[in-house]
Amino acid sequence: MKEPTRWRDAGGSAPPRVRELFTSAQPTRKMTQLELARSTAQVAQIAATPVGVLPGVLAKKIVMAILGIGGAVALVVAPRVGQDVPLMLKVAEPIERVGATVEAAGSGGPAPEEPGKSGERSTEGMESRATPAASRPAPLPKKPARGSVTKKVAPPMPSPPVSAEPVMEDSITREIVMLEEARRLMATSPSEALGRVEAHAREFPAGRLAAEREFLAIDALLRLGRKGEARARGEALLERSSGTPYEVRVRRKLDEMR
């Protein structure tokens, strides 16, 4: 009994056509990171599914899809007229059509078309030959069926006119602007800075920047030599800011006034 030999090994009894396929076939393409991640996710999904839930045929198809038979693009090199012609098999083609396409490539015949597409192409060709483009009647507008209700589309609402006046800033922006003005005036005119601070207190008595306002007021009073008033406002601020991040800062300010 002869030892079995592989067709690709030296001395193998491969037919000439098969030997040409071996020599002209392209090397195997490595899987991309996207394909590896997709395969890993599919394997994890199958492993988490109970065995009794998946029928045998469905499980077989899923496994074949993971291995790249049904889920990846297959490349078959078919020799035609002494030349290598790559034949691309689409991803969505079933396995039965893949086998038929490979057989057609080996025999040199055309690949079988999909049943739905071949019928459509032949019908389109017959219609185009039977009716010239110039003699085709123009399609008539469709009439609404009896009893159908035609919806009336309301005209778009006109957009409101754009006001020429500048848009008023929100309250926090207004507070920031007023206190920044007081801060800029502090070095050159403490009295004007104190006036801006008092204006902020009148406009925003419970504003979100009330604590910052009091710090500016204390600073302005100290620059004007009104140390008693500055200390009184500092102690009042300390009571209001107890337990807040401002407490340490207020205590430091009061220590500076001693």
Image: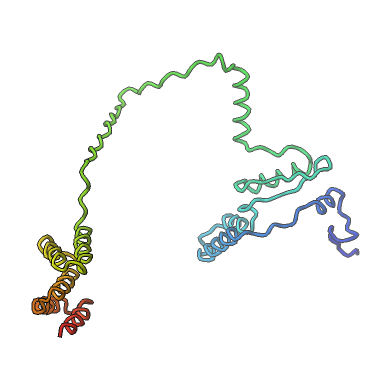
Above or below, 153 against 138 in this view is: below
In the orientation shown, which residue stands out farthest toward the top?
135
Q: Position of residue 199 (x, y in %)?
A: 12, 62
The front one of 35 and 57 is 35
Q: Position of residue 140 (x, y in %)?
A: 44, 18
Q: Is residue 173 left or right of residue 199?
A: right
Q: Position of residue 22 (x, y in %)?
A: 81, 54
Residue at image position (25%, 34%) is 158
Above or below, 26 against 236 in this view is: above
Q: Is residue 173 left or right of residue 116?
A: left
In the rendered view, how is the structure colored?
rainbow
Q: Position of residue 146 (x, y in %)?
A: 32, 22
The front one of 182 and 232 is 182
Q: Is residue 16 left or right of residue 54?
A: right
The front one of 256 and 8 is 256
Number of numbered markers: 0
User: From the image, which quarter does the C terminus lie in?
Assistant: bottom left
Picture quadrant where residue 28 is located: bottom right
